[in-house]
Image (cartoon, helix red, strand yellow):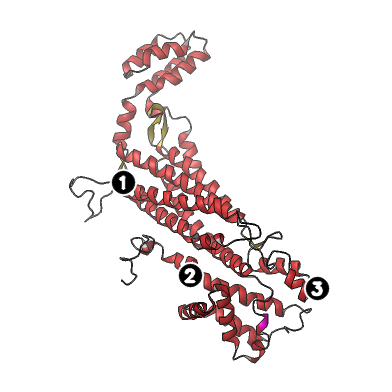
């Protein structure tokens, strides 16, 4: 059976294939091979720039153009050739080295120094930098921009509904009113913190040999400042140099990166659950789409499927991130191969996150507020004004205000008339009494509107 979006085992490459296309050039086998080649070529160029390494003279402009052209023109055919070589070598990184040697064989200048391709490198010198570049590009070009789109969409809700009064529910019970916009602003602030932290996670890299001590480097060229070269090389790639490693870069930063994305995802999950609930109680309606079906048997249904889809995929993403964060920082002595197996799944959690963010955005775009339902809930719960009344009573020294309001309101519905009659009995200044008499559940929102507008 041919592999297509219909026959793919994973929904990432099947049902959701059209939502994850921008990840393929990064997290696929093709992407990993391409970035391995980037590291190999750049390392050879770095060696050619070291005066102490006389055996690799400074390359001519034409030689540099040839090497960099391999990166610019890298294609699926090149990747397939490397996989063919791998069938012979049974080693994926060695296959890239042999491919590069094959490509320079017709260039005399480069062919003379072909044994300096992959010089003093262990496979993990190449792999850790390739993965670092993949994670860096995906974070900066895909993940953060989409996170910011989600955050901005919720910010627009915060501003749009900054003044829309809404009954709060603590423990699921009627509580002091807020505004719909303020509740959205809460999520915006939380999401902003996480995306900022994600942006600040340093993506580390190393190129220090088989066990991290530059053993082969110093044996071959003891006069060369290899740590200095390594630091410069890693930094020039746009990564942060890790000076202390075993054979592998220990992946602590990957755990930091994925833990941060997972926290962002948890907040989006919280948002989706709240929106699901607001839809269920009628605070939000959903715009219908011509041709869509909500239920196979109940024609009236307009289900909050986008928020449900987002929640499900965020759960899958975080399950993968949790495993990677717990597993990758651990190795046996100087290394084993379990990290290599697991690292090939770096894109899985990212893909499920991307799918979820797009679903959440789709759900947000279909929302319509039902102001009548919001007002109905407020009008049906005048007992929430027990809080401000008893606080004013406290201010003016009335005995046992909490207890008196508890007796009046706890566990029962309170009408505007009951509240009015109770206020009229209070021995408080007339201006304070008048303020309380003017109060309604919809007007008792504190500075919620200001907070929503300020986010």
Q: Secondary structure at mark 3?
A: loop
Label 1 – label 3 distance at C-alpha: 66 Å
- Residue contact at pointers 1 and 3, CB within 8 angstroms: no
| Bounds of the magenta segment | 115-119
Tag 3 or tag 2, which sits nearer the N-term?
2
Q: Say whether residue 317 is left or right of residue 223.
A: left
Residue hosting label 3:
222
Q: Does residue 202 show up?
A: yes
- Cα gap from disc 2 to disc 3, whole angstroms: 37 Å
The residues bearing labels 1 and 2 have C-alpha atoms spaced at a distance of: 36 Å
The residue depicted at 40 percent of the width and 41 percent of the height is: 161
User: Residue 401's spot in the image, x, y percent?
Assistant: 46, 12
Would you place residue 159 above or below residue 17 in this image?
Answer: above
> Does 311 appear in magenta?
no
| Pointer 1 residue | 304
Q: Which residue, given by chain and number where applicable, does mark 2 sit on?
A: 29
Query: Residue 255 location, x and y as percent?
Result: 57, 53
Any part of residue 195 in sight:
no
Q: Residue at x 41, y 66 (%)?
A: 21
Do the residues bearing badges 2 and 3 touch, measured as CB atoms within 8 Å? no
Q: Secondary structure at mark 2?
A: helix
The answer to whether 388 appears left or right of 71 in the picture is left
């Amino acid at each position: 059976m041919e592999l297509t979006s219909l026959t793919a085992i994973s929904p990432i490459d099947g049902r959701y294939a059209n939502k994850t296309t921008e990840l393929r050039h990064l997290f696929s086998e093709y992407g990993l091979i391409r970035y391995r080649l980037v590291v190999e070529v750049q390392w050879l160029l770095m060696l050619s720039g070291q005066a102490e390494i006389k055996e690799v003279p400074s390359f001519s402009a034409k030689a540099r153009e040839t090497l960099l052209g391999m990166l610019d023109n890298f294609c699926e055919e090149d990747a397939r050739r490397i996989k063919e070589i791998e069938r012979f070598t049974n080693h994926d990184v060695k296959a890239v080295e042999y491919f590069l040697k094959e490509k320079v064989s017709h260039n005399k200048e480069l062919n003379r120094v072909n044994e300096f391709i992959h010089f003093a490198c262990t496979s993990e010198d190449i792999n850790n930098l390739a993965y670092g570049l993949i994670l860096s590009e995906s974070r900066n070009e895909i993940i953060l921009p989409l996170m910011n789109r989600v955050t901005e969409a919720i910010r627009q809700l915060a501003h749009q509904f900054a003044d829309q009064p809404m009954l709060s529910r603590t423990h699921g019970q009627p509580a002091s009113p807020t505004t719909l916009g303020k509740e959205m602003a809460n999520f915006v602030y939380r999401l902003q913190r996480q995306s900022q932290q994600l942006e600040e996670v340093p993506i580390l890299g190393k190129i220090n040999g088989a066990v991290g001590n530059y053993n082969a480097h110093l044996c071959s060229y003891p006069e060369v400042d290899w740590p200095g070269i390594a630091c410069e090389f890693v930094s020039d790639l746009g990564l942060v140099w890790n000076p202390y490693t075993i054979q592998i870069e220990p992946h602590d930063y990957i755990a930091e990166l994925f833990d941060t994305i997972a926290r962002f995802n948890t907040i989006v999950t919280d948002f989706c659950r709240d929106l699901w609930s607001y839809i269920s109680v009628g605070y939000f309606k959903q715009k219908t789409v011509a041709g869509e079906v909500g239920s196979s048997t109940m024609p009236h249904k307009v289900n909050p499927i986008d928020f449900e889809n987002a929640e499900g995929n965020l759960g899958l993403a975080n399950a993968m991130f949790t495993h990677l964060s717990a597993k990758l920082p651990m190795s046996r002595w100087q290394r084993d191969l379990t990290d290599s197996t697991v690292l090939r799944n770096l894109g899985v959690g990212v893909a499920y996150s991307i799918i979820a963010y797009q679903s959440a955005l789709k759900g947000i775009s279909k929302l319509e507020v039902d102001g009548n339902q919001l007002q109905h809930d407020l009008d049906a719960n005048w007992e929430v004004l027990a809080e401000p009344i008893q606080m004013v009573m406290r201010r003016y020294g009335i005995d046992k205000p909490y207890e008196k309001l508890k007796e009046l309101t706890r566990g029962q519905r309170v009408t505007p008339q009951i509240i009015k009659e109770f206020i009229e009995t209070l021995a408080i200044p007339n201006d304070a009494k008048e303020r309380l008499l003017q109060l309604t559940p919809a007007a008792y929102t504190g500075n919620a509107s200001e907070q929503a507008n300020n986010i």
